[in-house]
Protein backbone atom coordinates (compact mmCIF):
# COMPACT_ATOMS: atom_id res chain seq x y z
CA UNK A 1 0.00 0.00 0.00
CA UNK A 2 1.55 3.27 -1.04
CA UNK A 3 1.35 6.25 1.30
CA UNK A 4 -0.61 9.32 0.37
CA UNK A 5 1.04 12.73 0.52
CA UNK A 6 -1.07 13.42 3.60
CA UNK A 7 0.21 10.24 5.29
CA UNK A 8 3.80 11.19 4.52
CA UNK A 9 3.50 14.81 5.64
CA UNK A 10 1.04 14.64 8.52
CA UNK A 11 1.29 11.04 9.67
CA UNK A 12 3.37 9.41 12.35
CA UNK A 13 4.66 6.47 10.32
CA UNK A 14 8.33 6.85 9.49
CA UNK A 15 8.52 6.00 5.78
CA UNK A 16 11.80 7.50 4.53
CA UNK A 17 11.78 8.41 0.85
CA UNK A 18 15.09 7.12 -0.46
CA UNK A 19 16.29 8.51 -3.79
CA UNK A 20 17.22 6.38 -6.80
CA UNK A 21 20.55 5.58 -5.11
CA UNK A 22 18.77 4.49 -1.94
CA UNK A 23 19.79 7.54 0.07
CA UNK A 24 18.31 10.33 2.15
CA UNK A 25 20.11 13.59 2.92
CA UNK A 26 21.43 13.90 6.47
CA UNK A 27 22.21 17.26 8.05
CA UNK A 28 24.15 17.40 11.31
CA UNK A 29 24.09 20.49 13.50
CA UNK A 30 25.78 21.13 16.83
CA UNK A 31 23.00 20.65 19.40
CA UNK A 32 24.39 23.41 21.59
CA UNK A 33 25.49 26.15 19.15
CA UNK A 34 23.16 25.34 16.26
CA UNK A 35 26.15 25.48 13.89
CA UNK A 36 25.80 23.41 10.73
CA UNK A 37 28.56 20.82 10.97
CA UNK A 38 28.13 18.68 7.86
CA UNK A 39 25.78 17.45 5.15
CA UNK A 40 26.02 13.79 4.21
CA UNK A 41 23.84 10.86 3.17
CA UNK A 42 22.35 7.78 4.78
CA UNK A 43 21.09 4.55 3.27
CA UNK A 44 18.55 2.40 5.09
CA UNK A 45 21.25 0.62 7.07
CA UNK A 46 22.98 3.83 8.16
CA UNK A 47 19.63 5.19 9.27
CA UNK A 48 18.79 2.03 11.18
CA UNK A 49 22.17 1.96 12.92
CA UNK A 50 21.88 5.64 13.82
CA UNK A 51 18.40 5.17 15.31
CA UNK A 52 19.39 2.04 17.24
CA UNK A 53 22.76 3.25 18.53
CA UNK A 54 22.13 6.99 18.98
CA UNK A 55 25.44 7.62 17.18
CA UNK A 56 25.73 8.90 13.62
CA UNK A 57 26.30 6.45 10.77
CA UNK A 58 26.43 7.60 7.15
CA UNK A 59 26.82 6.19 3.66
CA UNK A 60 29.71 7.46 1.55
CA UNK A 61 28.72 8.00 -2.07
CA UNK A 62 32.34 8.16 -3.18
CA UNK A 63 33.49 5.05 -1.33
CA UNK A 64 30.12 3.31 -1.71
CA UNK A 65 30.34 2.18 1.88
CA UNK A 66 28.65 2.51 5.22
CA UNK A 67 30.73 4.43 7.75
CA UNK A 68 30.44 5.38 11.34
CA UNK A 69 31.41 8.96 12.07
CA UNK A 70 34.41 8.85 14.37
CA UNK A 71 35.22 5.22 13.58
CA UNK A 72 38.87 6.04 12.93
CA UNK A 73 39.16 9.62 14.21
CA UNK A 74 37.28 9.17 17.48
CA UNK A 75 35.14 12.14 16.47
CA UNK A 76 31.89 10.34 17.16
CA UNK A 77 28.62 12.23 16.89
CA UNK A 78 26.22 11.46 19.73
CA UNK A 79 22.72 12.12 18.41
CA UNK A 80 20.58 14.01 20.90
CA UNK A 81 17.63 14.37 18.56
CA UNK A 82 16.79 13.05 15.12
CA UNK A 83 14.10 14.65 12.99
CA UNK A 84 12.63 14.02 9.57
CA UNK A 85 11.31 16.62 7.15
CA UNK A 86 7.86 17.02 5.60
CA UNK A 87 8.39 14.72 2.62
CA UNK A 88 10.67 12.33 4.55
CA UNK A 89 13.69 12.57 2.22
CA UNK A 90 15.96 14.38 4.68
CA UNK A 91 16.88 13.92 8.33
CA UNK A 92 18.29 16.38 10.83
CA UNK A 93 20.69 15.18 13.50
CA UNK A 94 21.24 17.45 16.48
CA UNK A 95 24.54 16.11 17.73
CA UNK A 96 27.08 16.40 20.46
CA UNK A 97 30.28 16.35 18.40
CA UNK A 98 33.01 14.41 20.20
CA UNK A 99 36.61 15.49 19.67
CA UNK A 100 37.71 18.63 17.94
CA UNK A 101 35.73 18.66 14.76
CA UNK A 102 33.42 17.12 12.21
CA UNK A 103 35.26 17.95 8.98
CA UNK A 104 37.91 15.67 7.51
CA UNK A 105 39.95 18.81 6.62
CA UNK A 106 40.57 19.41 10.31
CA UNK A 107 37.87 21.98 11.03
CA UNK A 108 34.93 21.95 13.38
CA UNK A 109 32.45 22.43 10.50
CA UNK A 110 32.66 21.58 6.80
CA UNK A 111 31.25 25.04 6.01
CA UNK A 112 34.36 27.20 6.49
CA UNK A 113 34.09 29.35 3.36
CA UNK A 114 31.53 32.01 2.43
CA UNK A 115 30.33 32.90 -1.04
CA UNK A 116 30.09 36.73 -1.29
CA UNK A 117 26.58 37.91 -2.16
CA UNK A 118 25.40 40.58 -4.59
CA UNK A 119 27.98 39.84 -7.23
CA UNK A 120 27.72 38.24 -10.63
CA UNK A 121 30.30 36.11 -12.42
CA UNK A 122 32.93 33.86 -10.88
CA UNK A 123 32.97 34.06 -7.10
CA UNK A 124 36.01 34.20 -4.86
CA UNK A 125 35.33 32.49 -1.56
CA UNK A 126 36.19 33.99 1.82
CA UNK A 127 37.35 31.92 4.78
CA UNK A 128 35.10 31.96 7.87
CA UNK A 129 35.99 30.13 11.11
CA UNK A 130 38.48 28.23 8.99
CA UNK A 131 41.15 27.67 11.63
CA UNK A 132 42.01 24.02 11.89
CA UNK A 133 41.02 22.52 15.22
CA UNK A 134 42.91 19.28 14.64
CA UNK A 135 45.59 17.90 12.34
CA UNK A 136 43.84 15.50 9.95
CA UNK A 137 47.09 13.75 8.99
CA UNK A 138 47.83 12.79 12.57
CA UNK A 139 44.20 11.79 13.23
CA UNK A 140 43.66 9.72 10.11
CA UNK A 141 47.28 8.64 9.65
CA UNK A 142 47.17 9.69 5.99
CA UNK A 143 45.78 12.45 3.80
CA UNK A 144 42.09 12.00 4.55
CA UNK A 145 39.43 11.96 1.87
CA UNK A 146 35.89 13.22 2.09
CA UNK A 147 33.98 10.79 4.29
CA UNK A 148 37.05 9.93 6.35
CA UNK A 149 35.93 8.18 9.45
CA UNK B 1 41.80 22.11 -16.21
CA UNK B 2 40.30 19.99 -13.49
CA UNK B 3 40.65 21.05 -9.88
CA UNK B 4 42.66 19.00 -7.44
CA UNK B 5 41.11 17.93 -4.15
CA UNK B 6 43.36 20.49 -2.46
CA UNK B 7 42.06 23.27 -4.76
CA UNK B 8 38.47 22.29 -4.01
CA UNK B 9 38.92 21.97 -0.25
CA UNK B 10 41.47 24.65 0.55
CA UNK B 11 41.18 27.05 -2.38
CA UNK B 12 39.14 30.20 -2.81
CA UNK B 13 37.70 29.44 -6.24
CA UNK B 14 34.03 28.62 -6.05
CA UNK B 15 33.66 25.49 -8.19
CA UNK B 16 30.38 23.86 -7.13
CA UNK B 17 30.27 20.10 -7.61
CA UNK B 18 26.89 19.43 -9.17
CA UNK B 19 25.60 15.87 -9.07
CA UNK B 20 24.51 13.87 -12.12
CA UNK B 21 21.22 15.82 -12.09
CA UNK B 22 23.10 19.13 -12.02
CA UNK B 23 22.23 19.89 -8.40
CA UNK B 24 23.86 20.77 -5.11
CA UNK B 25 22.16 20.34 -1.73
CA UNK B 26 21.00 23.56 -0.09
CA UNK B 27 20.37 23.82 3.64
CA UNK B 28 18.57 26.86 5.04
CA UNK B 29 18.80 27.76 8.72
CA UNK B 30 17.25 30.67 10.58
CA UNK B 31 20.11 33.16 10.97
CA UNK B 32 18.90 34.22 14.40
CA UNK B 33 17.75 30.98 16.09
CA UNK B 34 19.97 28.53 14.20
CA UNK B 35 16.89 26.33 13.58
CA UNK B 36 17.05 24.16 10.47
CA UNK B 37 14.22 25.40 8.26
CA UNK B 38 14.49 23.27 5.13
CA UNK B 39 16.70 21.15 2.90
CA UNK B 40 16.33 21.63 -0.85
CA UNK B 41 18.39 21.68 -4.03
CA UNK B 42 19.87 24.26 -6.38
CA UNK B 43 20.96 24.00 -9.96
CA UNK B 44 23.53 26.44 -11.41
CA UNK B 45 20.86 29.00 -12.22
CA UNK B 46 19.25 28.88 -8.78
CA UNK B 47 22.70 29.31 -7.23
CA UNK B 48 23.52 32.26 -9.51
CA UNK B 49 20.21 33.98 -8.81
CA UNK B 50 20.62 33.44 -5.07
CA UNK B 51 24.13 34.91 -5.09
CA UNK B 52 23.16 37.88 -7.25
CA UNK B 53 19.87 38.73 -5.52
CA UNK B 54 20.60 37.77 -1.91
CA UNK B 55 17.26 35.94 -1.87
CA UNK B 56 16.86 32.16 -1.97
CA UNK B 57 16.10 30.43 -5.25
CA UNK B 58 15.86 26.64 -5.51
CA UNK B 59 15.30 23.93 -8.07
CA UNK B 60 12.37 21.59 -7.56
CA UNK B 61 13.23 17.98 -8.42
CA UNK B 62 9.56 16.97 -8.53
CA UNK B 63 8.40 19.85 -10.69
CA UNK B 64 11.73 20.06 -12.59
CA UNK B 65 11.61 23.84 -12.34
CA UNK B 66 13.45 26.77 -10.85
CA UNK B 67 11.51 28.46 -8.07
CA UNK B 68 11.98 31.48 -5.89
CA UNK B 69 11.12 30.85 -2.26
CA UNK B 70 8.20 33.11 -1.40
CA UNK B 71 7.27 33.72 -5.02
CA UNK B 72 3.62 32.89 -4.36
CA UNK B 73 3.48 32.78 -0.54
CA UNK B 74 5.45 35.96 0.16
CA UNK B 75 7.65 33.85 2.46
CA UNK B 76 10.88 35.09 0.91
CA UNK B 77 14.20 34.06 2.45
CA UNK B 78 16.67 36.93 2.68
CA UNK B 79 20.13 35.36 2.66
CA UNK B 80 22.41 36.91 5.26
CA UNK B 81 25.29 34.54 4.61
CA UNK B 82 25.94 31.80 2.10
CA UNK B 83 28.59 29.17 2.71
CA UNK B 84 29.92 26.17 0.81
CA UNK B 85 31.22 22.93 2.27
CA UNK B 86 34.60 21.24 1.94
CA UNK B 87 33.91 19.34 -1.27
CA UNK B 88 31.63 22.06 -2.66
CA UNK B 89 28.56 19.89 -3.19
CA UNK B 90 26.41 21.57 -0.53
CA UNK B 91 25.63 25.15 0.42
CA UNK B 92 24.36 26.62 3.68
CA UNK B 93 22.05 29.61 3.63
CA UNK B 94 21.67 31.57 6.86
CA UNK B 95 18.40 33.31 6.20
CA UNK B 96 15.96 35.81 7.56
CA UNK B 97 12.69 34.02 6.90
CA UNK B 98 9.99 36.47 5.86
CA UNK B 99 6.38 35.66 6.80
CA UNK B 100 5.31 32.95 9.12
CA UNK B 101 7.16 29.90 7.91
CA UNK B 102 9.35 28.02 5.47
CA UNK B 103 7.40 24.77 5.12
CA UNK B 104 4.64 24.31 2.58
CA UNK B 105 2.65 22.39 5.23
CA UNK B 106 2.19 25.62 7.18
CA UNK B 107 4.96 25.27 9.73
CA UNK B 108 7.99 27.39 10.43
CA UNK B 109 10.39 24.48 9.75
CA UNK B 110 10.00 21.35 7.61
CA UNK B 111 11.47 19.31 10.47
CA UNK B 112 8.45 19.05 12.78
CA UNK B 113 8.65 15.33 13.62
CA UNK B 114 11.24 13.43 15.64
CA UNK B 115 12.33 9.84 15.17
CA UNK B 116 12.66 8.20 18.62
CA UNK B 117 16.16 6.85 19.28
CA UNK B 118 17.30 3.62 20.82
CA UNK B 119 14.61 1.48 19.26
CA UNK B 120 14.68 -1.09 16.52
CA UNK B 121 11.99 -1.90 13.99
CA UNK B 122 9.36 0.42 12.56
CA UNK B 123 9.48 3.85 14.12
CA UNK B 124 6.53 5.97 15.20
CA UNK B 125 7.29 9.64 14.79
CA UNK B 126 6.61 12.26 17.45
CA UNK B 127 5.52 15.80 16.66
CA UNK B 128 7.88 18.61 17.72
CA UNK B 129 7.08 22.31 17.25
CA UNK B 130 4.46 21.12 14.80
CA UNK B 131 1.87 23.84 15.34
CA UNK B 132 0.92 25.44 12.07
CA UNK B 133 1.99 29.07 11.86
CA UNK B 134 0.02 29.74 8.73
CA UNK B 135 -2.79 28.19 6.69
CA UNK B 136 -1.21 26.79 3.53
CA UNK B 137 -4.52 26.62 1.65
CA UNK B 138 -5.15 30.32 2.11
CA UNK B 139 -1.55 31.21 1.28
CA UNK B 140 -1.15 29.05 -1.81
CA UNK B 141 -4.81 29.13 -2.87
CA UNK B 142 -4.83 25.33 -3.22
CA UNK B 143 -3.47 22.25 -1.52
CA UNK B 144 0.25 23.00 -1.79
CA UNK B 145 2.80 20.45 -2.90
CA UNK B 146 6.38 20.12 -1.76
CA UNK B 147 8.32 22.97 -3.32
CA UNK B 148 5.29 25.28 -3.24
CA UNK B 149 6.49 28.79 -3.75
Image (tube, coloured by chain):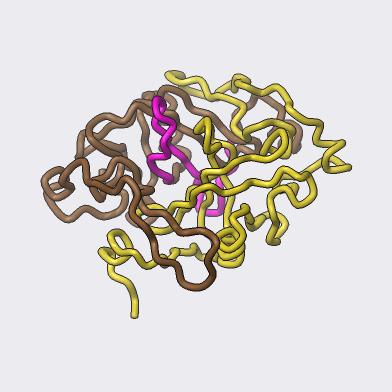
Chain colours: A yellow, B brown
Residue A84 drawn at (x, y percent): 42, 54
Please give the name of the residue rendered at 69% of the width and 31% of the height, measured from the top-left corner. A107
Please give the name of the residue rendered at 50% of the width and 44% of the height, measured from the top-left corner. B25
Residue A147 drawn at (x, y percent): 70, 48
- Quarter of the image where one finds residue A21: bottom right
Q: Residue furthest front?
A: B118
Is A147 in front, or is B16? A147
Please state if B14 lies on the left or on the right of A117 as rendered.
right
Is residue A104 in view from this perspective? yes
- Quarter of the image where one finds residue A64: bottom right
Position of the C terminus of chain B by quadrant? top left
Please determine whether, in this image, residue B32 is positioned above or below residue A97: above
Please give the name of the residue rendered at 79% of the width and 49% of the height, measured from the top-left corner. A72
Residue A19 located within the stretch drawn in magenta: no
Please give the name of the residue rendered at 66% of the width and 32% of the height, measured from the top-left corner. A108
Number of labelled discs? 0
Image: magenta residue range: B16-40
- Quarter of the image where one finds residue A74: top right
Please determine whether, in this image, residue A63 is positioned above or below residue B23: below
Residue B42 drawn at (x, y percent): 44, 42
Is residue B1 in view from this perspective? no
Is A60 in front, or is A73? A73
Position of the N terminus of chain B by quadrant? top right
Residue B39 located within the stretch drawn in magenta: yes
Is B115 in front, or is A38? B115
Residue B31 drawn at (x, y percent): 41, 26
Amino acid sequence: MSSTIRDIEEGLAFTPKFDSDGLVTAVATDAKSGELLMVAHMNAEALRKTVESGEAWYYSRSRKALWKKGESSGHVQRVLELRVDCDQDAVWLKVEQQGSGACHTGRRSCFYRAIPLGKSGAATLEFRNADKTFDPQSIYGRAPGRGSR
